[in-house]
Amino acid sequence: MRSPTDLLHAAAARGLDRGRAALAVRAAVAAAAAWLVVWPLGGLADEYPYYAPFGAVVAVTGTVAVSARASLGAVAAIMVGSAVALGFAAAPLPEAVALAAAVGVGTLLAGWTPLRASASWVPMAAVFVLELGGQEPWEFATAYFALTALGALVGTAVDLAYPALPWRETDDSLRGLRRSLADQLDAVADTLGSDDPPDPDVWVRTRTPVVDRSVTVDATVAEAAVARRANWRARGWWHVPEAQQRRAETLRHLAMLVQDLRTMLEAHEHRDVTTPALGPSLRRPAAEAARAVAAALRSATPASEAGEGDADELDDEQRRDLEVAVAALRALEEEVRRNRRETQADLFAAASAVTTLWRVLATVVPPALREELAPGW
């Protein structure tokens, strides 16, 4: 028989999300454990045993702190919804009117701040108690509340026994965002890599919402930081969430820089503008610089993203990518200066593009290496 660890490895090998696979195993274990706990209790547990595994599945999140919060929220919402339903069940109202009133009041109460995270549970619990409780709404409400709470305790206990360490998934998200930013710079290079001015539609077709993706990654990093709380497995990994937070901040900054560069070029570098930002003499050097910076960004180390990189940690390929990027940016700078001398034009937009590419590169260059690669940086 294969162990849960074997199943997780098999799921990962098939391209499934490892965190989701681990959550599935925890939920299955919690549901089975809750069923076994409630089965011998008798009484109401004999009539409504399924609410225990129901509560267990609700509680399991993989993170102890979130699991406890989800459990308390769900149980509190069930209690409020049940109270609303019992009140209308006792009133001399037609069934349809009582149901409508209970759902309406339950939906209003769901807006109360402490219940907001479990808002949908309030009217749902009211409907369950009114419609499934039959002639014994108090009995049903008691079983619903108590057995769900019992199952939630079991689910929280499962998370506490073997809590998640979601940092590998978070690391994958950070690497994915970095690759997306590099891909976006490559798309800029492809668009600029011609003597002819680009079509405005090309910029639109190659646009990627990198800033939105960085916000999503920030949320993932924040969830990973929460996973440390009440997590005995996290004791030897206290430094990982801080490093990932710094990496996320760096990548958020990078996303804004790349987006700003694209926005400027999209507005000022296409065939419909009379005075382009770059023009035919600067487009190719700018494309080469953007592509070189993309390669350096793609090969950057997580440590350099976190601001902890050491020059000695770079391998030959990473150092070569950085050197090529610096050389390409120097060449672009020189072309901008030459064009300014020959045309007497301000070239503010071109200078802005150069500065932005330098700032992108600077975020992934170990501080100790900056002076060596580009004196005066």
Image (cartoon, rainbow, N blue to C red):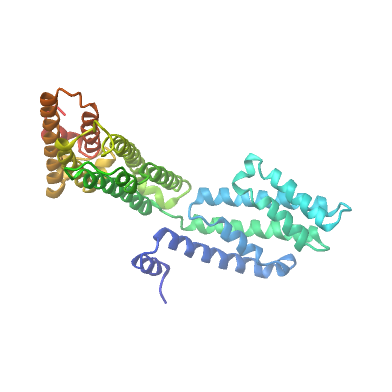
* Residue 150 location (% of width, % of height): 64, 58
Q: Is residue 368 left or right of residue 68?
A: left
264 or 359: which is nearer to us? Answer: 264
Is 89 rendered above or below residue 349? below
The N terminus appears in which quarter of the rendering?
A: bottom left
| 316 vs 50, nearest the viewer | 316
Q: Nearer the viewer, residue 354 or 373?
A: 354
Return the x and y of residue 176 as percentages of the image width and height: 32, 51
Left or right? Give the position of 337 relative to 33. left
Please count the marks in the image. Answer: 0
Image coordinates of residue 43 in percent, x first then y, are 75, 67
Furthest toward the right, the residue is 92
Q: In which quarter of the image is residue 35?
A: bottom right
Query: Is residue 142 something one can see in this rendering?
Result: no
Instruction: Classify the position of the C terminus by image quarter.
Output: top left
Residue 312 in sight from this viewpoint: yes
Q: In this view, does 266 lie above or below 136?
A: above
Q: State left or right for residue 207 relative to residue 346.
A: right
- What is the quadrant of residue 246 in the picture? top left
- Residue drawn at x 63%, y 41% as measured from the top left: 114
Q: Position of residue 76 (x, y in %)?
A: 67, 48
Is residue 46 left or right of 186 when viewed as pictured?
A: right
